[in-house]
Protein backbone atom coordinates (compact mmCIF):
# COMPACT_ATOMS: atom_id res chain seq x y z
CA UNK A 1 0.00 0.00 0.00
CA UNK A 2 2.20 2.78 -1.24
CA UNK A 3 0.77 6.27 -1.39
CA UNK A 4 2.29 8.74 -3.86
CA UNK A 5 5.31 10.57 -2.46
CA UNK A 6 4.47 13.70 -0.51
CA UNK A 7 6.80 16.33 -1.90
CA UNK A 8 7.99 19.26 0.21
CA UNK A 9 11.09 19.74 -1.81
CA UNK A 10 10.16 20.20 -5.42
CA UNK A 11 12.69 20.56 -8.21
CA UNK A 12 12.60 24.38 -7.96
CA UNK A 13 13.19 24.38 -4.25
CA UNK A 14 16.02 21.84 -4.65
CA UNK A 15 17.58 23.98 -7.36
CA UNK A 16 17.38 27.15 -5.24
CA UNK A 17 18.92 25.45 -2.23
CA UNK A 18 21.65 23.92 -4.39
CA UNK A 19 22.51 27.32 -5.85
CA UNK A 20 22.64 28.98 -2.45
CA UNK A 21 24.79 26.17 -1.01
CA UNK A 22 27.19 26.23 -3.95
CA UNK A 23 27.61 30.02 -3.97
CA UNK A 24 28.20 30.08 -0.23
CA UNK A 25 30.46 27.04 -0.23
CA UNK A 26 32.66 27.76 -3.23
CA UNK A 27 33.20 31.44 -2.39
CA UNK A 28 34.18 30.53 1.19
CA UNK A 29 37.72 29.90 2.29
CA UNK A 30 38.41 27.04 2.67
CA UNK A 31 35.91 25.86 0.07
CA UNK A 32 33.18 23.44 1.10
CA UNK A 33 30.06 21.73 -0.25
CA UNK A 34 27.32 20.12 1.87
CA UNK A 35 27.19 16.31 1.70
CA UNK A 36 23.48 16.19 0.91
CA UNK A 37 24.28 16.92 -2.74
CA UNK A 38 26.04 13.55 -3.17
CA UNK A 39 22.70 11.82 -3.37
CA UNK A 40 21.28 12.08 -6.86
CA UNK A 41 20.21 8.70 -8.31
CA UNK A 42 23.83 7.79 -9.21
CA UNK A 43 25.18 8.97 -5.83
CA UNK A 44 22.51 7.03 -3.93
CA UNK A 45 23.48 3.96 -5.95
CA UNK A 46 27.17 4.50 -5.17
CA UNK A 47 26.36 4.83 -1.48
CA UNK A 48 24.52 1.50 -1.62
CA UNK A 49 27.72 -0.01 -3.08
CA UNK A 50 29.76 1.58 -0.28
CA UNK A 51 27.61 -0.19 2.32
CA UNK A 52 28.76 -3.52 0.87
CA UNK A 53 32.49 -2.74 0.78
CA UNK A 54 34.72 -4.82 3.05
CA UNK A 55 36.20 -1.64 4.59
CA UNK A 56 32.87 0.07 5.29
CA UNK A 57 31.77 -1.57 8.54
CA UNK A 58 29.05 0.84 9.84
CA UNK A 59 26.15 -0.63 7.87
CA UNK A 60 26.95 -4.22 8.87
CA UNK A 61 27.61 -3.26 12.49
CA UNK A 62 24.33 -1.37 12.75
CA UNK A 63 22.44 -4.19 11.07
CA UNK A 64 23.89 -6.62 13.62
CA UNK A 65 22.63 -4.44 16.48
CA UNK A 66 19.19 -4.08 14.90
CA UNK A 67 18.94 -7.83 14.34
CA UNK A 68 19.75 -8.40 17.98
CA UNK A 69 17.59 -5.62 19.44
CA UNK A 70 14.57 -5.15 17.17
CA UNK A 71 12.25 -7.07 19.49
CA UNK A 72 13.40 -5.02 22.47
CA UNK A 73 12.91 -1.81 20.52
CA UNK A 74 9.37 -2.87 19.70
CA UNK A 75 8.63 -3.79 23.32
CA UNK A 76 10.26 -0.71 24.88
CA UNK A 77 8.67 1.79 22.53
CA UNK A 78 5.28 0.30 21.70
CA UNK A 79 5.50 2.48 18.60
CA UNK A 80 2.72 2.28 16.02
CA UNK A 81 4.19 4.60 13.39
CA UNK A 82 7.77 4.21 12.20
CA UNK A 83 9.32 7.36 10.77
CA UNK A 84 12.71 7.05 9.14
CA UNK A 85 14.76 10.19 8.50
CA UNK A 86 17.32 10.20 5.69
CA UNK A 87 16.04 6.77 4.88
CA UNK A 88 17.78 6.23 1.55
CA UNK A 89 16.94 2.74 0.34
CA UNK A 90 15.72 1.63 3.80
CA UNK A 91 17.49 -1.72 3.69
CA UNK A 92 17.86 -1.99 7.47
CA UNK A 93 14.36 -0.78 8.09
CA UNK A 94 12.73 -4.12 7.39
CA UNK A 95 14.23 -5.45 10.63
CA UNK A 96 12.33 -2.79 12.53
CA UNK A 97 9.17 -3.27 10.49
CA UNK A 98 9.15 -7.02 11.16
CA UNK A 99 9.46 -6.46 14.90
CA UNK A 100 7.17 -3.45 15.28
CA UNK A 101 4.30 -4.35 12.94
CA UNK A 102 3.54 -0.65 12.74
CA UNK A 103 0.34 0.70 11.24
CA UNK A 104 2.39 2.80 8.85
CA UNK A 105 5.88 3.55 7.66
CA UNK A 106 6.94 7.11 6.89
CA UNK A 107 10.37 7.41 5.21
CA UNK A 108 11.67 10.96 4.64
CA UNK A 109 14.58 11.67 2.32
CA UNK A 110 15.87 14.38 -0.04
CA UNK A 111 16.19 11.84 -2.82
CA UNK A 112 12.92 10.97 -4.60
CA UNK A 113 14.68 8.16 -6.50
CA UNK A 114 15.92 6.51 -3.30
CA UNK A 115 12.47 6.91 -1.72
CA UNK A 116 10.70 5.39 -4.72
CA UNK A 117 13.06 2.43 -4.70
CA UNK A 118 12.62 1.99 -0.95
CA UNK A 119 8.85 2.27 -1.08
CA UNK A 120 8.65 -0.26 -3.90
CA UNK A 121 10.88 -2.78 -2.14
CA UNK A 122 9.14 -2.37 1.22
CA UNK A 123 5.73 -2.71 -0.42
CA UNK A 124 6.80 -6.06 -1.92
CA UNK A 125 7.76 -7.47 1.48
CA UNK A 126 4.99 -5.81 3.51
CA UNK A 127 2.03 -5.64 1.14
CA UNK A 128 -0.43 -4.58 3.83
CA UNK A 129 1.73 -1.81 5.28
CA UNK A 130 0.83 1.75 4.30
CA UNK A 131 4.04 3.46 3.17
CA UNK A 132 3.92 7.21 3.12
CA UNK A 133 7.15 8.56 1.64
CA UNK A 134 7.98 12.23 2.17
CA UNK A 135 10.47 14.01 -0.05
CA UNK A 136 11.96 16.55 2.29
CA UNK A 137 15.03 18.02 3.90
CA UNK A 138 15.31 16.72 7.45
CA UNK A 139 16.78 20.05 8.54
CA UNK A 140 13.78 22.01 7.27
CA UNK A 141 10.72 19.82 6.90
CA UNK A 142 10.27 17.90 10.16
CA UNK A 143 7.12 19.94 10.70
CA UNK A 144 5.44 17.93 7.93
CA UNK A 145 5.82 14.62 9.73
CA UNK A 146 2.45 13.11 10.56
CA UNK A 147 1.18 13.18 14.14
CA UNK A 148 -1.21 10.42 15.21
CA UNK A 149 -0.33 7.39 17.30
CA UNK A 150 2.89 6.66 19.15
CA UNK A 151 5.82 7.36 16.87
CA UNK A 152 9.36 6.05 16.69
CA UNK A 153 11.71 8.28 14.71
CA UNK A 154 14.70 6.34 13.39
CA UNK A 155 17.78 8.20 12.24
CA UNK A 156 20.18 5.44 11.31
CA UNK A 157 23.49 4.87 9.62
CA UNK A 158 25.41 7.48 11.57
CA UNK A 159 24.13 10.23 9.29
CA UNK A 160 23.89 12.57 12.30
CA UNK A 161 27.69 12.64 12.01
CA UNK A 162 27.34 14.73 8.85
CA UNK A 163 26.22 17.68 10.97
CA UNK A 164 28.58 20.02 12.77
CA UNK A 165 28.08 20.08 16.55
CA UNK A 166 25.89 23.22 16.51
CA UNK A 167 23.74 21.86 13.66
CA UNK A 168 23.45 18.58 15.54
CA UNK A 169 22.16 20.33 18.63
CA UNK A 170 19.58 22.22 16.61
CA UNK A 171 18.53 19.10 14.72
CA UNK A 172 18.07 16.99 17.87
CA UNK A 173 16.10 19.81 19.51
CA UNK A 174 13.92 20.03 16.39
CA UNK A 175 13.24 16.28 16.45
CA UNK A 176 12.38 16.56 20.14
CA UNK A 177 10.11 19.48 19.26
CA UNK A 178 7.94 17.44 16.90
CA UNK A 179 7.63 14.49 19.31
CA UNK A 180 5.22 14.19 22.19
CA UNK A 181 6.47 13.13 25.62
CA UNK A 182 6.84 9.34 25.67
CA UNK A 183 7.60 8.99 21.97
CA UNK A 184 11.01 7.71 20.90
CA UNK A 185 14.11 8.39 18.83
CA UNK A 186 16.37 5.58 17.63
CA UNK A 187 19.74 7.08 16.75
CA UNK A 188 22.65 5.38 15.01
CA UNK A 189 26.14 6.73 15.72
CA UNK A 190 29.49 5.49 14.52
CA UNK A 191 32.03 5.31 17.34
CA UNK A 192 35.54 6.69 17.78
CA UNK A 193 38.14 4.06 16.92
CA UNK A 194 41.56 3.71 15.39
CA UNK A 195 42.18 5.75 12.23
CA UNK A 196 43.60 2.51 10.82
CA UNK A 197 40.01 1.30 10.69
CA UNK A 198 38.27 4.62 10.12
CA UNK A 199 40.29 5.99 7.22
CA UNK A 200 40.00 2.92 4.95
CA UNK A 201 36.24 2.94 5.53
CA UNK A 202 36.26 6.31 3.74
CA UNK A 203 39.03 5.50 1.27
CA UNK A 204 38.35 1.99 0.03
CA UNK A 205 40.70 0.02 -2.19
CA UNK A 206 38.13 -0.35 -4.97
CA UNK A 207 37.72 3.44 -5.21
CA UNK A 208 33.95 3.49 -4.78
CA UNK A 209 34.06 6.19 -2.10
CA UNK A 210 36.31 8.28 -4.35
CA UNK A 211 33.66 8.06 -7.10
CA UNK A 212 30.95 8.88 -4.57
CA UNK A 213 32.91 11.94 -3.45
CA UNK A 214 33.55 13.15 -7.00
CA UNK A 215 29.88 12.60 -7.85
CA UNK A 216 29.06 15.89 -6.15
CA UNK A 217 30.96 17.64 -8.95
CA UNK A 218 28.89 15.74 -11.54
CA UNK A 219 25.75 16.94 -9.76
CA UNK A 220 27.00 20.54 -10.09
CA UNK A 221 27.92 20.01 -13.73
CA UNK A 222 24.50 18.57 -14.47
CA UNK A 223 22.28 20.94 -12.49
CA UNK A 224 24.24 24.19 -12.76
CA UNK A 225 25.98 23.61 -16.11
CA UNK A 226 29.31 23.83 -14.31
CA UNK A 227 32.40 22.62 -16.15
CA UNK A 228 34.29 20.79 -13.38
CA UNK A 229 36.91 18.42 -14.76
CA UNK A 230 35.79 15.67 -12.40
CA UNK A 231 38.95 13.60 -12.85
CA UNK A 232 41.04 16.66 -12.03
CA UNK A 233 40.08 16.19 -8.37
CA UNK A 234 41.63 13.60 -6.08
CA UNK A 235 39.68 11.96 -3.29
CA UNK A 236 41.01 12.71 0.20
CA UNK A 237 39.81 11.11 3.45
CA UNK A 238 41.47 12.07 6.72
CA UNK A 239 40.88 11.67 10.44
CA UNK A 240 40.59 14.95 12.32
CA UNK A 241 41.68 13.82 15.78
CA UNK A 242 40.78 17.12 17.50
CA UNK A 243 37.20 17.16 16.25
CA UNK A 244 36.92 13.37 16.16
CA UNK A 245 35.50 13.31 12.68
CA UNK A 246 36.43 11.98 9.26
CA UNK A 247 36.72 14.66 6.60
CA UNK A 248 36.30 13.98 2.93
CA UNK A 249 37.79 16.48 0.57
CA UNK A 250 38.36 16.88 -3.16
CA UNK A 251 41.84 18.13 -3.99
CA UNK A 252 42.57 19.93 -7.27
CA UNK A 253 45.38 18.08 -9.01
CA UNK A 254 46.40 21.22 -10.94
CA UNK A 255 45.28 24.85 -11.11
CA UNK A 256 41.77 25.15 -12.44
CA UNK A 257 39.21 27.72 -13.37
CA UNK A 258 35.65 26.43 -13.14
CA UNK A 259 32.77 28.30 -14.71
CA UNK A 260 29.27 27.94 -13.29
CA UNK A 261 27.00 29.82 -15.70
CA UNK A 262 23.81 29.21 -13.73
CA UNK A 263 25.37 31.15 -10.84
CA UNK A 264 27.27 33.65 -12.90
CA UNK A 265 30.30 32.43 -11.00
CA UNK A 266 33.90 31.64 -11.87
CA UNK A 267 35.78 29.66 -9.24
CA UNK A 268 39.58 29.49 -9.22
CA UNK A 269 41.48 26.56 -7.74
CA UNK A 270 45.16 26.61 -6.91
CA UNK A 271 46.96 23.32 -7.45
CA UNK A 272 46.35 21.23 -4.33
CA UNK A 273 43.45 23.38 -3.14
CA UNK A 274 40.68 21.39 -1.49
CA UNK A 275 36.91 21.44 -1.17
CA UNK A 276 35.63 19.88 2.04
CA UNK A 277 32.67 17.76 0.97
CA UNK A 278 31.74 15.88 4.15
CA UNK A 279 32.41 15.50 7.81
CA UNK A 280 31.43 12.21 9.40
CA UNK A 281 31.69 12.62 13.15
CA UNK A 282 32.46 9.65 15.37
CA UNK A 283 31.04 9.49 18.87
CA UNK A 284 31.53 8.31 22.42
CA UNK A 285 28.74 7.29 24.75
CA UNK A 286 29.17 10.28 27.09
CA UNK A 287 28.91 12.71 24.20
CA UNK A 288 25.80 11.12 22.70
CA UNK A 289 24.11 10.99 26.09
CA UNK A 290 24.96 14.62 26.80
CA UNK A 291 23.69 15.82 23.42
CA UNK A 292 20.46 13.84 23.75
CA UNK A 293 19.88 15.17 27.26
CA UNK A 294 20.52 18.75 26.17
CA UNK A 295 17.94 18.29 23.41
CA UNK A 296 15.33 17.15 25.93
CA UNK A 297 15.61 13.38 25.48
CA UNK A 298 16.33 10.73 28.08
CA UNK A 299 18.66 7.95 26.93
CA UNK A 300 16.92 4.66 27.72
CA UNK A 301 19.16 2.17 25.90
CA UNK A 302 22.68 2.16 24.49
CA UNK A 303 23.55 -0.84 22.37
CA UNK A 304 26.73 -1.60 20.43
CA UNK A 305 27.81 -4.40 18.13
CA UNK A 306 30.13 -7.01 19.71
CA UNK A 307 33.23 -5.11 18.53
CA UNK A 308 31.86 -1.74 19.79
CA UNK A 309 32.31 -0.14 16.42
CA UNK A 310 28.84 1.38 16.19
CA UNK A 311 26.08 2.30 18.64
CA UNK A 312 22.32 2.52 18.60
CA UNK A 313 20.72 4.77 21.19
CA UNK A 314 17.09 4.56 22.13
CA UNK A 315 15.92 7.84 23.62
CA UNK A 316 12.59 8.95 24.98
CA UNK A 317 11.05 12.36 24.47
C1 LIG B 1 25.41 7.99 4.99
C2 LIG B 1 26.33 9.83 6.15
C3 LIG B 1 26.25 7.69 7.19
O1 LIG B 1 29.13 9.32 6.85
O2 LIG B 1 29.55 7.20 6.75
C4 LIG B 1 29.96 6.95 3.35
C5 LIG B 1 28.17 8.67 4.09
N1 LIG B 1 30.44 9.02 3.13
N2 LIG B 1 31.19 7.04 2.84
C6 LIG B 1 28.93 8.19 6.39
C7 LIG B 1 29.49 8.22 3.54
C8 LIG B 1 31.47 8.29 2.69
C9 LIG B 1 27.81 7.99 5.38
N3 LIG B 1 26.47 8.39 5.91
Image (spheres, helix red, strand yellow):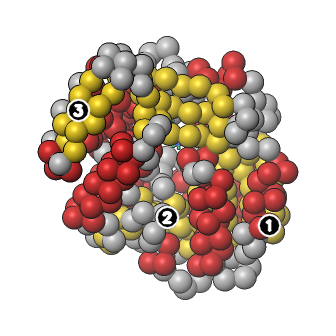
Tell me which numbered mark, 2 or 3, is placed earlier along the sequence: 2
Residue at 49%, 64% in the rendered image: 139
Which of the two discs, 3 and 1, sits closer to the camera? 3
* Residue 229 seen in the figure: yes
Q: CA distance from mark 2 to mark 1?
A: 20 Å
35 on left or right of 111:
right
Q: What kind of element bears circle 3?
A: strand
- Give x and y (percent) for residue 30: 47, 37
Tag in front: 2 or 3: 3
Q: Assign a secondary structure to mark 1.
A: helix
Which residue is tagged 1? 293
Placement of 159 over or under 30, stated as above or below: below
State the image coordinates of residue 112 (x, y, percent, origin top left): 31, 57
Name the residue nearer the viewer: 303 or 128: 303
Foreground: 161 or 112?
161
**How far separated are the C-alphas under marks 3 and 1?**
45 Å
- Name the image quarter holding the C terminus: bottom right
Q: In which quadrant is the N terminus drawn?
A: bottom left
At x 23%, y 28%, the residue is 257
Question: Which residue carries the number 3 mark?
Answer: 258
Residue ID for mark 2: 139
Determine which quarter of the picture holds residue 155.
Answer: bottom right
Residues at circles 2 and 3 in contact by the CB criterion of under 8 Å: no
Q: Visible in this render: residue 48?
A: no
Q: Residues within 10 Å of mark 1 (few under 14, many from 20)?
A: some
User: In the structure shown, which secondary structural element does the residue marked by tag 2 occupy?
Assistant: loop
Q: Residue at x 48, y 56 (%)?
A: 86
Q: Position of residue 45 (x, y in %)?
A: 35, 37
Amino acid sequence: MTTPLEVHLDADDQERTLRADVVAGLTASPKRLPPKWFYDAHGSELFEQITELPEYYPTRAERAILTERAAEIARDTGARTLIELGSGYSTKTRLLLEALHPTRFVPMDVSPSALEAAATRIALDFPALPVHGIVGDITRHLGFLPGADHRLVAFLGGTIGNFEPAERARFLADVRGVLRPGEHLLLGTDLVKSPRVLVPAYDDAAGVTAEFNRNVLRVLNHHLQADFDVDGFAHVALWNADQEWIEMRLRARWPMRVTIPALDLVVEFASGEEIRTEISAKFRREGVEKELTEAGFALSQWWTDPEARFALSLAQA
